[in-house]
Image (tube, helix red, strand yellow):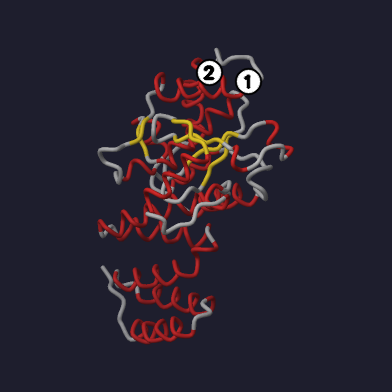
Amino acid sequence: MDTTLSEISALLAKVKSPMLDDWDPLRLGLLLARLEYEDLDIEAQTRAFRDQVEPLLKDCPKTDQIWEKVAFVNQVFTEELGFKGDTNNYYNIKNSFLNDVILRRKGIPITLSLVYMALCRKVGLKALGIAFPGHFLVRIILPEEEGSAITWRQQRFVDAFDSAKILNVDDCEKRLEEWTRGVLVFGPEALKVAHPQEITSRILRNLKAIFQEKEDLPRLYWVLTGLIELCPAEGTESLKERGLLMGRMGRYANAAQDLKAYMSSCTDPQRVSHAERLLRFFETQREFTN
């Protein structure tokens, strides 16, 4: 797992601006999947994906009309390749691992968006992830947008989960209103381009919720480790969560180590005081041995 975490970290570190710096969505998704499938051959998976899609993409229109190309990619994505949202079993763990998504042709918004973005790259379209609240989207970047010739209200998006449906800003505003009943205020911040680190965090948090629900402690361990190592915004609280998990598993020395690291990073005195009480308890316990 350490090697995979290092590779993901290196990919994330190269992206200073997600709007300007290029990165490979397929590789990121497959690297995250390798945290579950330790023997996953990413190069072989990438070649297999290329061999599947390139014959289908060779007839992409040679045109400057961006939306003609988008319509072509949408047809390949939904009809030729058959990708669709898994509406029947949304929380199936396989929907979060890109190798399974490619195999099953089903997934959740964020993983299907990674596949869609990868297809766009192969035909010269610039497509970026959008961390829309509750439902990840893809934004098609127009050439004139590079020079800030359009306003944010003129942007358009693709919902890879919903048959690659094209949305405008009004559609997104309506969706947010329906989903949150006005709790979240709509504005350009809701449609910001996602850094691959945000994508990593979102996928890992999805998995964390699933593994917590299933009481799958070994898998929860590697998800929390991923959040600690890859997602600074999640790292401090994930240290505490992993410490508590280690305590549940009878690994009290590890639990104490994580809680000490948490206490050194946490700035909330009440939280630190609570962690100190937990630490004293763990330090009095004996390790479970097999």
Q: Nearer the viewer, residue 196 or 97?
A: 196
Q: Count numbered badges in the picture.
A: 2
User: Residue 141, image x and y in percent?
Assistant: 62, 35
If the image is split into quadrants, where does the C terminus sit?
bottom left
Q: In the drawing, what numbered circle is on residue 178? A: none
- Verify CB contact (< 8 Å) between mark 1 and mark 2: no
Q: Quadrant of residue 125?
A: top right
Residue position for label 1: 65
Please name the residue shown 64% across and 16% down the image.
63
Residue position for label 2: 57
Residue type at mark 1 is Gln
Q: Nearer the viewer, residue 19 or 247?
A: 19
Q: Secondary structure at mark 1?
A: loop
In this rendering, is residue 257 above or below 109?
Answer: below
Q: Nearer the viewer, residue 148 or 10?
A: 148
Please name the residue shown 67% across and 50% down the image.
16
User: Residue 228, image x and y in percent?
Assistant: 49, 63
Q: Secondary structure at mark 2?
A: helix
Q: Is residue 194 left or right of residue 147?
A: left
Q: Is residue 30 left or right of residue 288?
A: right
Q: Is residue 254 left or right of residue 22?
A: left
In this rendering, is residue 284 above or below 202?
Answer: below
Residue type at mark 2 is Leu
Classify mark 1: residues with Cα within 10 Å, few (<14), some (14-19) or many (20+): few
Dot in front, 1 or 2: 1
Q: Quadrant of residue 78?
A: top left
Q: Quadrant of residue 248?
A: bottom left
Classify mark 2: residues with Cα within 10 Å, few (<14), some (14-19) or many (20+): some
User: Residue 234, image x and y in percent?
Assistant: 49, 63
The Cα atoms of the two marked residues, 1 and 2, are separated by 16 Å
Most extreme residue toward the right, as rendered? Answer: 147
